[in-house]
Image (tube, rainbow, N blue to C red):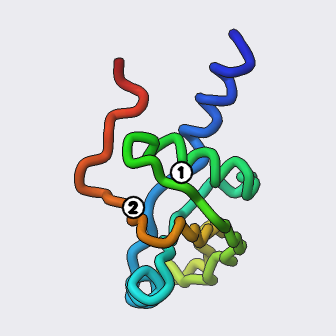
Amino acid sequence: MSDSLKKYGRLMQVILAPYISEKGTFIAEAHNQTIFRVARNATKDEIKAAIELIWKDQEIIVEKVQTMNVKGKKKRFGRYLGSRSSWKKAIVSVKEGQELSFTNLPSVGAK
């Protein structure tokens, strides 16, 4: 397998899902940023490249990526004590005047 194909496959596994919340909606409107749930071992450079790859038809340019690790909450399941999984969150800033559109995403992996 070539290095570029491995890199492409890795980038398609970095972004797990958009993270929709009240705070995230406020950030999106006020600061032109979007929040994503990403792989726990993803780097900022990989997140930036993955966003630009997924939205390459819209020619999105990522200006800044901020990441944080969210610790899983302790939860009680009946009489057993457990915990939810920890995860990583990325706040992605795109260039002024651009917007990430989730309505018509291209099928990047399909040929």
Q: Residue at coordinates 32% horizontally, 38% vertically from top-left?
A: 106
Could you tell me which quadrant the N terminus lies in?
A: top right
SS category of the residue bearing label 2: loop
State the image coordinates of residue 94 (x, y, percent, origin top left). Answer: 53, 66
Look at the picture and state if 102 lies above or below 95: above
Which amino acid lies under the numbered mark 1 shown in the image of this protein? Ile
Q: Picture coordinates of residue 13 (x, y %)? A: 57, 41
Q: Earlier in the sequence, mark 2 or mark 1?
A: 1
Using the image as rendered, state which of residue 60 and residue 90 is in the foreground: 60
**View extreme (left): residue:** 103
Are dots 2 and 1 in contact, CB under 8 Å?
yes
Residue behind mark 2: 100
Q: Position of residue 4 (x, y in %)?
A: 68, 21
User: Is the C terminus in the top left, top right, bottom left or bottom right quadrant?
Assistant: top left
Residue closer to the observer: 31 or 46:
31
Tell me the quarter of the picture where residue 101 sits: bottom left
Disc ID at residue 51 = 1
Question: Horizontal placement of 86 versus 54: left or right?
Answer: right
Q: Residue at the location (43% across, 63% down)?
A: 18
Q: What residue sits 24% from the left and 55% below the top? A: 103
79 on left or right of 88: left
Q: Position of residue 74 (x, y in %)?
A: 63, 83
77 is higher (above) or lower (below) than 103: below
In front of the other: 93 or 78: 93
Q: Residues within 10 Å of mark 2 (few under 14, many from 20)?
A: some
Name the kind of residue labelled 2 in the image. Answer: Leu
Q: Nearer the viewer, residue 35 or 65?
A: 65
Quarter occupied by residue 72: bottom right
Mark 2 → mark 1, Cα distance in angstroms: 9 Å
In the image, is 92 to the left or to the right of 97? right
Asked if 64 appears above or below 51 in the picture, the reply is below
